[in-house]
Image (spheres, rainbow, N blue to C red):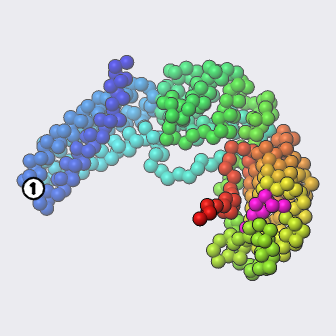
Amino acid sequence: MITEFIGKFHPLLVHLPIGFFLLAFFLKVISFWKNKESIDAILPIMLILSFLASVFSSITGFLLSQSGEYDVEMVDKHQWSGIAFTALILVVYFFRNNAKMGIVSWIGSTILLMVVGHLGGSLTHGEDFLSIQGEVEKARITDIQNAKVYNDLVQPILEEKCYSCHSSKKQKGNLRLDSPEFILKGGKEGKSVVPHQTEKSLISKRIFMPEGEEEHMPPKGKPQLTEAETKVLNWWIKEGASFDKLVKDFNQTPEIKAALISFQSSGNDEKGPKISNIPEKEVEAGSEQSIATLKKSGILALPVAANSNYLLINLRNIDPSDKDLEALKSLKKQIVWFNASNLKNADLLAATLGDLDEIRVLHLNKTNFSDKGMAALKNLKHLQILNLASTAVTEKGLENIKGLSELQKVYLYQSKVRFSKLKMADFPKIKLDTGGYSVPTLVTDTSLVKPPM
């Protein structure tokens, strides 16, 4: 409709009366010190322009409000305060030369302008758009299979990523997603959810659109859904969009099980103070002879930071000899980061790793490391990050690390772990990452090769 089209000009026009009025106010303040006559000649023009712009802004704002996409109560406040501001501009114009009334009208108009602007910002961006907030705090899910799909998974996703445009305060496209009733009702573009039919559900169609497309949701510039969140929303709709069933009541493919596990440790486990992966208490320097032995074999042994005696070890695809293993054991107090990725016989390292009880970060990815070697990791009481991606470790092997109190994250992408058999309640404080991540790497994972001169 033509009225709806004209209403869309409101966000553009609304800045004109603000700009003209604030410039006039700034000039008025300057006129108390200098150029009074020149400024007094310009002020009427600025105020008339501000008034006319405010009138057009009010008209387009009224037309925009008829779309029904905004909270009625807040629209009324914004609308009438905007009209009051427009009227006050005329008061300022007619009393601009009156010393007492002029000052009162200028101050009153400026304060009202701030109110109008704040209400407009709240309508567009939400009531808390000026507040400083951290990440939305989510309830901890200790047993994903016994979690309620809607209450514990779907509703928190919608609240974090969708409510700013589709809730009681704003209904873009006449769509609300803040209650089951409104979710099933849909909006003017169609049904947001059609149980069992993702191809007909607006949510499914919009979240899978390329981010650059205009109809992709959430809009470009807004926080986007993670891969796991996208899969879970689509899965919920495909399985019937129940508002009361538990996760275990739904059919689950291996892909969905992996996505669900990513919700296991969401919430407060990452809110507390972080444990540094470099010990605060310094240690004596390690044996220079042992470091030299490792370097002779092509194994890197470098300080983790400047002026630190703690070491990072990178085997660089080199299976260590017995002599190297003895050198590693002699440096047990100093080694805190250890990269053993891409080794052919990683299980042979297990006994040595069990002795290196100061390790904080351990990479065993892309190796044949198995449940047999996992038993040795029980002793790594300070271990924080463990990378088991593309290894032979299963869910049984993970039982060996559930007692490590400082362990924060375990990477399991393409491992042999069967997530349907894994007891997630045994790992309440550990983030089990199943894919779609960027693995932290050691500084020495890349080498600079210079061409021969």
* In magenta stretch: residue 314: yes
- Residue depicted at 88% across the width and 52% down the height: 370
For the C terminus, give its image quadrant.
Answer: bottom right
Q: Quadrant of residue 242?
A: top right
Looking at the picture, tell me which residue is in the foreground, 434 or 111.
Answer: 434
Residue lying farthest left? Answer: 37
Residue 452: image location, x then y, percent: 62, 63
The residue segment tinted magenta is: 312-319
- Residue depicted at 45% across the width and 28% down the height: 69
Whether residue 183 is visible, yes or no, is: no
- Residue depicted at 10% across the width and 57% down the height: 35
Residue 205: image location, x then y, percent: 59, 26
Q: Establish if 427 lies above or below 325.
A: above
Left or right, 31 with respect to 197, comes to left
Residue flagged by tag 1: what amino acid is it? Lys
Q: Establish if 334 lies above or below 13.
A: below
Left or right, 16 with respect to 330, comes to left
Left or right, 84 with respect to 225, comes to left
Residue 302: image location, x then y, percent: 71, 71
* Residue picked out by circle 1: 36
Whether residue 295 is visible, yes or no, is: yes
- Residue depicted at 85% across the width and 54% down the height: 344
Residue lying farthest front? Answer: 453
* In magenta stretch: residue 431: no
Looking at the picture, tell me which residue is in the foreground, 41 or 75.
Answer: 41
Residue 369: image location, x then y, percent: 86, 53
